[in-house]
Image (spheres, grey):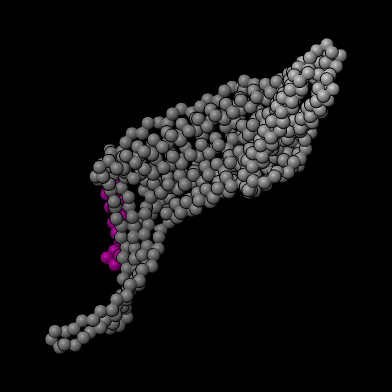
Amino acid sequence: MSLRLPMPRVAITPMASTRHGALPIASLRIAALALAVSALAACVTVAPPPSTVEPPPAWRDAPGAGIAVQRDWWRGYNDPVLSQLVDTALAGNTDLRLAAARVAEARALLDAQGAAQWPTLDLTASAQRSRSVSAATGRANISDVSQPQFQAAYEVDLWGRLDALTDAARANLLASQTGADSVRLSVAAAVASAYLGLRASDARLEVAQRTLVSREGALKVAQRRFDTGYSSRLELAQAQAEYRATAQVVPQLRLVIRRQEDALSVLLGRAPEAVPRGRALDEIAAPALPAAGVPSQLLRRRPDIAQAEAQIAAADSSLDAARAQLLPSLRLTGSLGSLDSSLLRGDPIRLWSVGGSVLAPLFNHGRLRAQVQAGAARRDQAVLGYQKTVLTAFAEVEDALAAIAQLREQREQAQQQRQALSEALRIAHNRYNEGYASYLEELDAQRNLFNAELTVLQLQGDALTAEVNLYKALGGGWELAAER
């Protein structure tokens, strides 16, 4: 896959004249072509770029049929707060505003480079007053001289150097635009992942607080049994240790939540503050999986791949411009003005001139050839960067598909483990009350069930985040921008 950018060529028909007649423009062009022969001999040979990456025929963990990748895919989670947070981030994220500034800079540079293909017109004006004394008469003469003048210049783009520089600037603009789209996709995915992780931490904190209340009740019962002589100090110490272990989890989760809120606030472009909550974790709907399609479709869907393509086009055009530097250049100039002096009688003298000049590089100690070699190296870097981007894109899709499949199976196993541990706790509690087992058996069952509940909630949040990563890896939300 290659990115085609238009490369316009300007037809030049030079015409110039002076008071002595027409300039021999044809002779100038012949001389330029003759000088180009020696310059062409000095051109360096540039190796072709490395071959492109062949996409795999299919995904290793193809999800089968699915919905088309939607532009606002985050609304599929059916959480209005999540949608609002993503919209806020897309409007105020600092990385997105920085990317927009880069696009504005690239557009201005394209305008500036395009203007270099047009003639320039300048106005100069000079004024001078002088005093001279005659040695014979001793009289002082004061003269005033003024000379306004219009000057025009135009570089004939014989070898397409200016066109190549304009094409490079146009490709850089496209790279900046697709780079901004890539940042937009990353910000939306980061906000969605951070919010889902926050809701998972909230759910884990609720379980920890509920368990802590249960541990506190068990500790009170153990204290009463010890005070009345129905249990030993060992059982009381075990109940106290289990209560303290659970109490440690609560501030840990609160710290995790605070850090997630701060990170989410930065993504929103705000100072750290509390983040509003929407639906609970178990109420957030899992959107339908997008259709991954064939791997080759990914090359047109992801903005970072299009950005890498544009960078190759910019490097190619810059290399063409560097090659053109080895060839002669033709510049046409003209001026129109007047000369007015107080020492002259009558109207001001009108002055005009039209001419041309040829500049051919003869000796520069290899500087121009080194620039061509540097341009070729930058082109190869862009090609290798494109290959790495494509390979990374394929790997991200494969990782996301594999994570969704494996996390689904892992979550099912964790839920079944939680059910088994809940039954084990019920049996251990009954055995302890009937005097068939020690309190340590019940404590082990409580500890295992608590850890299993936290694991189920973590896996539930990870599964939702894996779907976010799949949408991001498939370039979700970039359909309209891709048409650019």
Q: Which of 6 and 166 is in front in this view?
A: 166
Q: Which residue is drawn at 29% across and 55% down?
A: 357
In the image, 214 versus 38, the foreground residue is 214
Please state the horizontal and vertical placement of residue 120, each as a whole percent of the image.
40, 60
Compared with residue 257, is residue 18 higher up or lower down, i.e. above or below? below
Q: Give the image quarter of residue 440.
A: top right
Residue 78: horizontal and vertical position, in percent? 76, 37
Q: Residue at x 75, y 19 (%)?
A: 234
Residue 127 highlighted magenta (yes or no): no
**Residue depicted at 34% across the width and 60% down the height:** 333
296 lies above or below 350 = above
**Depth check: 369 or 246 in front?**
246
Q: Is residue 99 left or right of residue 374?
A: right
Report the magenta residues as a range: 15-34
Q: In this view, does 329 lie to the left or right of 8?
A: left
Q: In this view, does 422 lie to the left or right of 102?
A: right
User: Visible in this render: residue 296?
Assistant: no
Q: Where is residue 209 in the image (x, y as percent from the top left)?
A: 76, 32
* Residue 286 x %, y %: 74, 31
- Which corner quadrant of the image does residue 393 belong to? top right
Query: Residue sitting at 55 percent across and 46 percent down?
Result: 99
Q: Which of 105 and 327 is in front in this view?
A: 105
- Give the quarter of the figure containing the C terminus: top right
Residue 126 in the image: above or below residue 272: below
* Residue farthest top in this picture: 436
**Residue 17 is covered by the magenta coloring:** yes
